[in-house]
Image (spheres, rainbow, N blue to C red):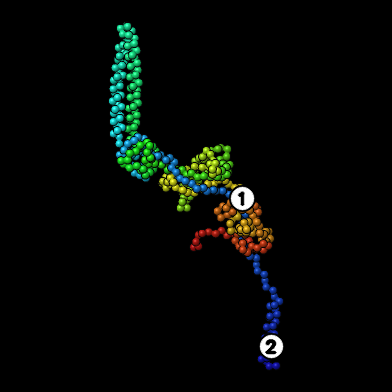
């Protein structure tokens, strides 16, 4: 056998030996998959509810004419703040001034008549005592004097009425507030039977009306009002207002009062809240969502939403046992609180629940649990 043939034979034998050795060596099993878990702990959870709210002025003073006449002037700028007593409109005062002058003249005339009857009584009394005149003449003089007194009082009332009507020609604001659009123009004939001239609304603070269910009202009352029975003294009565653009109003509100009865048609109770409004951002007629804490659930179990798997209307979670083996557990969920769910049944405090890696967590699988890494929205530097 040549040297070249010998080398080739040795190479073939070596390859066969190596192949046989590889077939006898077994592949190493993969390590258990890693999953991120949270340990469930009982906690006290505040429960919030939201309702649709309608804003309104704390006071809405409808300005109407109290006497009939032609509108002469508008003395305020629409949409501006006005003070209590500020002049808003003027009605032509000339007819009312004429009535006042007539009432004063009649009063002066009747006062003169009263004085004459007083003098008659004073003159006739001693004469009647001396029987120089008949008793009937004195009685007639006394009755005339009393009638003159009554007439003077009637005239004085007429003067006061005329003065009052004259004052009504100057229409002033009864409150501090924001004046609205004028509903009458200069030259219009206005009067008590006419419409509203304008409205002045006090909007700092501003009211918000919202309807709550009877059940929510009872739950709230038990948790926050209790024995003292006072809305103003109850704790936890802060309200939050979410505006129509989704932004949260910067000031907290307070419960003001509840209506006297539940609406029998809707089964709801109207609640009124107050919000400070120094910058007059909030206006009557706006809508928003009112958010408030209605109760506190104690010793409650919370699970992140990512840990739940929904299957045919039921919810399941992957629970890790003492040997790091997965157990698929059916749970009963309650309210959703942010990104977490309240678990009513199926879990207990201390259970380890898989949050990240649930696709690897099959029933009976052994895993390597790691604490859940909190995620932040801060960009990496």
Disc 2 or 1, which lies upstream in sequence? Answer: 2
- When asked about the image quadrant of residue 193, the answer is top left
Q: Position of residue 272 (x, y in %)?
A: 49, 42
User: Dot 1 surroundings within 10 Å: few (below 14), some, or many (20 or more)?
Assistant: some
- When asked about the image quadrant of residue 122, the answer is top left
Residue at coordinates 68% horizontally, 83% vertically from top-left?
15
Q: Position of residue 166 (x, y in %)?
A: 32, 32
Q: Nearer the viewer, residue 193 or 162?
A: 193
Residue 355 against residue 10 in the figure, above or below: above
Q: Position of residue 71 (x, y in %)?
A: 32, 39
Residue identifier under label 2:
9
Find numbered disc 2 in the image and state the secondary structure of the residue it sits on: helix
Q: Nearer the viewer, residue 211 or 146?
A: 146
Closer to the eye: label 2 or 1? 1
Q: Position of residue 52 (x, y in %)?
A: 50, 48
Residue identifier under label 1:
300
User: Dot 2 surroundings within 10 Å: few (below 14), some, or many (20 or more)?
Assistant: few
Find numbered disc 1 in the image and state the secondary structure of the residue it sits on: strand
Residue 2 against residue 326 in the figure, above or below: below
Label 2 with label 1: CB-CB less than 8 Å:
no
Residue at coordinates 58% horizontally, 38% vertically from top-left?
227
Mark 2 to mark 1: distance in Å?
77 Å
Residue at coordinates 61% horizontally, 63% vertically from top-left?
359
- When asked about the image quadrant of residue 143, the answer is top left
Residue at coordinates 35% horizontally, 44% vertically from top-left?
78
């Amino acid at each position: 056998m040549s040297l070249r043939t010998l080398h080739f034979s040795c190479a073939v034998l070596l390859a066969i030996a190596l192949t046989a050795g590889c077939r006898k060596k077994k592949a190493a099993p993969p390590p258990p998959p890693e999953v991120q878990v949270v340990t469930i702990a009982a906690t006290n959870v505040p429960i919030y509810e939201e309702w649709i709210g309608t804003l309104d002025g704390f006071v809405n003073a409808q300005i109407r004419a109290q006497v009939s006449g032609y509108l002469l002037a508008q003395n305020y700028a629409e949409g501006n703040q006005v003070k209590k007593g500020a002049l808003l409109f003027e009605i032509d005062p000339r007819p009312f001034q004429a009535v006042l002058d007539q009432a004063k003249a009649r009063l002066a005339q009747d006062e003169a008549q009263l004085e004459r009857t007083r003098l008659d009584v004073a003159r006739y009394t001693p004469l009647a005592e001396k029987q120089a005149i008949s008793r009937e003449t004195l009685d007639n003089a006394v009755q005339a004097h009393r009638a003159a007194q009554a007439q003077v009082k009637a005239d004085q009332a007429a003067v006061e009425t005329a003065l009052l009507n004259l004052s009504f020609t100057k229409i002033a604001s009864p409150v501090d507030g924001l004046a609205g659009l004028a509903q009458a123009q200069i030259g219009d004939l206005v009067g008590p039977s006419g419409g509203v001239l304008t409205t002045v609304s006090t909007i700092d603070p501003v009211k918000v009306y919202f309807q709550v269910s009877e059940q929510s009202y009872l739950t709230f009352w038990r948790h926050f009002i209790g024995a003292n029975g006072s809305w103003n003294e109850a704790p936890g009565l802060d309200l939050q207002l979410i505006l129509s653009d989704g932004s949260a109003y910067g000031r907290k509100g307070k419960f003001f009062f509840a209506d006297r009865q539940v609406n029998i048609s809707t089964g709801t109770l109207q609640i009124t809240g107050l919000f400070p409004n120094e910058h007059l951002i909030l206006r009557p007629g706006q809508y928003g969502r009112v958010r408030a804490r209605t109760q506190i659930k104690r010793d409650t179990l919370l699970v992140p939403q990512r840990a739940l798997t929904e299957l045919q209307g039921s919810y399941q979670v992957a629970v890790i046992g003492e040997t790091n083996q997965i157990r698929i557990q059916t749970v009963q969920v309650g309210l959703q609180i942010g990104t977490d769910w309240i678990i009513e049944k199926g879990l207990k405090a201390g259970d380890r629940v898989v949050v990240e890696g649930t696709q690897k967590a099959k029933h009976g699988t052994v895993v390597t649990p790691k604490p859940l890494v909190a995620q932040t929205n801060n960009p990496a530097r």
